Image: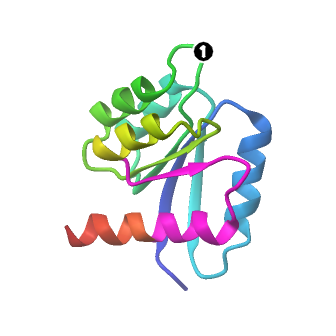
Amino acid sequence: MNEQINVLLIEDNPGDIRLVQEMLRESSDFNINLMVAENLDKGLKLIASEYIQVILLDLNFPESHGINTFRHVKKFALTVPIIILSILSDNEIIYQAMKEGAQDYLIKGSIKNEALIRSINYAVWCAHHV
């Protein structure tokens, strides 16, 4: 059995939550323990209280939007890789997020199962080898 990877999804859209859950269930190569936070506050509490290896982060919430959402979460998760899952395909936001330390930036609606799983695996590998 493979080592468990603890992934936190911070996402407020129930449809997107279900989609990520389904994508990760289809992975037979990795044992992914997915925790879900439906808002930023709950996400930050889980970051503080759980062993999180990778964060999957939407950028738009009622209380925070765009790159500021990433910056806020990054303050609480300095050593945890953050993969952004967003409908925003604005190259400026993507560039800024990557420049500020996002592990990856995947566009919702065009994410394939393999790409998401590969991104998570790479984030965990990088965190252990940097």
**64 relative position to 98: left or right:** right
Question: What amino acid is at disc 1?
Answer: Pro
Residue at the extreme left:
130
Q: Which image quarter holds the N terminus? A: bottom right
Pick the residue in front: 2 or 24: 24
Q: Where 118 falls versus 80 (above or below)?
A: below
**43 relative position to 117: left or right:** left
Q: Residue 70: x percent and y percent? A: 41, 33
Magenta region, residue range = 102-121
- For label 1, the residue is 62
Q: Secondary structure at mark 1?
A: loop
Pick the residue in front: 78 or 58: 58
Q: What residue is shown at x 66% (from left), y 30% (from top)? A: 12
Q: Where 101 falls versus 119 (above or below)?
A: above
Q: Residue 59: x percent and y percent? A: 53, 31
The image quadrant of residue 103 is: bottom left
Q: Where 68 falls versus 100 (above or below)?
A: above
Q: Residue 11: x percent and y percent? A: 62, 35
Q: What residue is shown at x 49% (from left), y 26% (from top)? A: 66
Q: What residue is shown at x 30% (from left), y 68% (from top)? A: 126
In the rendered image, residue 108 lying in the magenta stretch gets the answer yes
Q: Residue 82: x percent and y percent? A: 41, 48
Residue at the extreme front:
91
Q: Where 90 falls versus 53 (above or below)?
A: above
**113 relative position to 57: left or right:** right
In the rendered image, residue 70 lying in the magenta stretch gets the answer no
Q: What residue is shown at x 34% (from left), y 30% (from top)? A: 71
Residue at the extreme top:
63
Q: Which image quarter holds the C terminus? A: bottom left
